[in-house]
């Protein structure tokens, strides 16, 4: 795919590159390179967010009146592409990209005035309370309850797979406020500080040895009703709107392009019976297929950026983008594991992260391969399983 850029676009690209060259330090690039989890480490992400906030470039998709850039679709495309090329860390999306659009649409003026500036400054750090034991992809079956008591709700239950809950000081949460109606109609969307009495966070360590997710328990937690977003019992509508932004707000194709370039570089160095893998017809054909799919994803993301620029939500296209980006990324990690074969050691990244870099076992490009491969398996499930996305596409796009 070739996109024609105007002289003004190329001038903007030069401005972005100069900014990244100046502000994105070698240390930050190296930290981002060693990231093996779905989000960057909190400290790295918050340092980079502070730099972007100072520049006014932290939230390109936000309305200008709340701190957005007012960039064109092409400028947003260039920004995503150049950040991927530079190896910039991703900002934590839970507040900036997921909750913020919900507040723009459903939040009260008071909620917007209070939460949006604190979200942008990094003063508030959010996590998401959706999934529960037994209620993951079947989200409407959730059981965490919220019962009215005066001006408050009393919340009891548990949430699981809660990413970065160990760092978060706030959680946006789905709770059941009416058990006597059909499941989707009795859910409410609440905002809670994590320091409320009765909230407890237990770590979950993944098979990649990451502490990224947690289980959160609520024991008679008192939450003001003013912390509700949208009408009571209409939280399902709010939740679905948020999930459109979690599943695909545009930008994955740029990172995948870089990952494919890295894979080709690895394949040019690794050999099978003396032949570079990049010259093996079968291996090269698998890479070529991924490149074609990545270009198709890029077209889809440009459509999504266009929708967002008009003030729309990503719609069902977010489900298609999620499935496509996850499948491509998982296949890239699989091919990289095949290419580096016996250097794909578990926990090699933990050795270097703890400062033990000499002597190194295997090449640099093998360092994070296994951890990323393992972590990427979860992407087929979080944000709604692959099968759930296919059902959404079948219903809303194909009319089945």
Image (cartoon, helix red, strand yellow):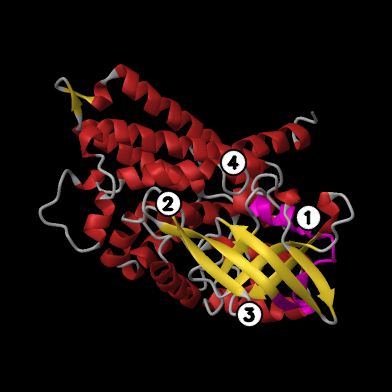
Report the Cα–Cα distance between label 2 and label 1.
29 Å
Numbered tag placed on residue 236 in the rendering? 1
Verify CB contact (< 8 Å) between mark 2 and mark 1: no
Q: Which of marks 4 and 1 is in front?
A: 1
Q: From the viewer's side, name the closer residue of 140 and 44.
A: 140
Residue at 71% from the left image edge and 67% from the top image edge: 156
Magenta span includes 229 = yes
Farthest residue in the front direction? 219
Residue 140 at what x, y percent from top left? Answer: 75, 50
Comes first in the chain, label 4 or label 3: 3
Tell me residue 287's x, y (percent). 38, 28
Q: Which residue is drawn at 74% across and 34% down?
A: 397
Mark 1 or mark 3: which comes first in sequence? 3
User: Residue 223 appears in which quarter of the rendering?
Assistant: bottom right
Residue to which mark 2 is pinned: 206
Residue to which mark 4 is pinned? 321
Q: Are there few (<14), some (14-19), or many (20+) residues within 10 Å of tag 2? A: some
Question: Residue under circle 3?
Answer: 196
Residue 11 is drawn in which quadrant?
bottom left
Instruction: Give the residues drawn in magenta, as a range.
Output: 221-245
């Amino acid at each position: 795919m070739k996109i024609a850029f105007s002289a003004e676009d190329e001038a903007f690209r030069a401005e972005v590159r100069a900014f990244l060259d100046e502000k994105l330090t070698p240390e930050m690039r190296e930290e981002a390179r060693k990231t093996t989890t779905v989000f960057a480490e909190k400290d790295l992400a918050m340092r980079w967010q502070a730099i972007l906030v100072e520049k006014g470039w932290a939230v390109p998709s936000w309305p200008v009146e709340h701190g957005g850039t007012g960039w064109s679709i092409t400028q947003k495309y260039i920004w995503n592409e150049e950040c991927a090329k530079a190896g910039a860390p991703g900002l934590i999306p839970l507040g900036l990209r997921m909750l913020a659009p919900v507040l723009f649409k459903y939040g009260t003026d008071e909620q917007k005035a209070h939460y949006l500036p604190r979200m942008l400054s990094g003063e508030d750090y959010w996590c998401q309370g959706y999934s529960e034991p037994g209620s993951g992809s079947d989200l409407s079956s959730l059981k965490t309850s919220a019962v009215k008591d005066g001006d408050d709700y009393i919340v009891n239950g548990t949430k699981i797979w809660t990413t970065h809950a160990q760092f978060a000081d706030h959680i946006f949460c789905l709770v059941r406020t009416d058990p006597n109606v059909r499941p989707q109609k009795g859910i409410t969307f609440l905002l809670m500080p994590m320091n409320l009495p009765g909230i407890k966070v237990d770590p979950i360590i993944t098979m990649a040895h990451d502490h990224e997710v947690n289980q959160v328990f609520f024991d008679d937690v008192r939450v003001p009703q003013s912390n509700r977003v949208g009408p009571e019992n209409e939280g399902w509508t709010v939740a679905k709107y948020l999930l459109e932004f979690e599943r695909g707000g545009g930008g994955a194709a740029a990172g995948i392009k870089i990952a494919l370039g890295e894979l080709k570089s690895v394949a040019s160095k690794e050999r099978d019976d003396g032949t570079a893998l990049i010259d093996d017809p079968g291996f090269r054909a698998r890479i070529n297929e991924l490149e074609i799919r990545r270009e198709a994803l890029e077209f889809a993301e440009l459509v999504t950026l266009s929708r967002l620029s008009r003030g729309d939500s990503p719609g069902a296209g977010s489900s298609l983008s999620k499935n496509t980006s996850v499948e491509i990324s998982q296949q890239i990690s699989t091919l990289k594991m095949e290419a580096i074969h016996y250097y794909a050691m578990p926990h090699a990244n933990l050795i270097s992260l703890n400062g033990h870099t000499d002597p190194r076992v295997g090449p640099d490009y093998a360092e994070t391969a296994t951890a990323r491969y393992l972590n990427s398996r979860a992407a087929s499930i979080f944000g709604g399983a692959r099968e759930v996305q296919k059902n959404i596409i079948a219903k809303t796009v194909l009319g089945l």
